[in-house]
Image (spheres, rainbow, N blue to C red):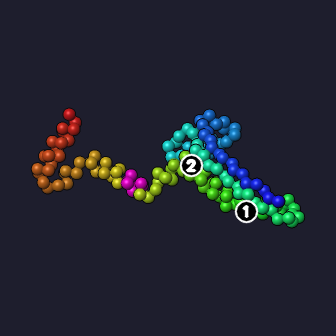
Amino acid sequence: AYISGFEVAVWFSINLARFPTSMIPASLIFVLKMLTGTFSESFTMDGSTLIFKEWPVPQLRWSARQVITIAQAKYQSSILLFVAKALGSSNILALPRLLLPNLLLQNVANIAADVVSAVDLSALTLDEDYKKERQRMKHKQED
């Protein structure tokens, strides 16, 4: 005897703005929007497939509880892989991707460069030519 293998494909797109708050609290909808990283109005999963492989069952007398326990142990890795793939194909992990260390450092460096270029540090230098050039550039930008 055996239990034949089967696959379950899952994909969806939920419009969070239209989701009734009677089904899910508004605070949870806000958290989902925040986790998508862009405060988008939809929560999507492009597609993931849960695969259950064929399982030959020995000719033993088992209780229903024993069959469930053994099936859980047998398919636990498939379910964990499915959850990981599902999260990877959804937009729920957009915010953590935006906070990757290299991207975070790049964004901080860009912001710091913008701040430094916006602040006039020419008053701190003793070079009069540089001060005049900087003032000339500043007036040119204003015109």
Helix, strand or loop at label 2? It is loop
* Image position of 48 (left or right of 116): right
> Which kind of residue does numbered mark 2 sit on?
Ser
In the picture as drawn, the residue positioned furthest to the left comes out as 129
Q: Position of residue 18 (x, y in %)?
A: 62, 34
The dominant secondary structure in magenta is helix
Give, as a three-letter code, the residue at label 1: Lys
Q: Does residue 32 show up?
A: no
**Which of marks 1 and 2 precedes in the sequence?**
1
Position of residue 79 in the picture relative to residue 140 (left or right)? right
In this view, the residue in front, 77 or 126, is 77
Q: Residue at x 66, y 42 (%)?
A: 25
Choose mark 2 or mark 1, whichever is in front: 1
Q: Which residue is mark 1?
A: 74
In the picture as drawn, the residue positioned furthest to the front comes out as 1
Disc 2 marks which residue?
Answer: 89
Query: Badge 2: few (under 14), some or many (20 or more) residues near its Cα, within 10 Å?
Result: some
Secondary structure under badge 1? helix
Residue at 50 percent across and 43 percent down: it is 38
Residue 87 image offset from top left, x and y in percent? 59, 51
Q: Check the picture and name the quadrant holding the C terminus.
A: top left
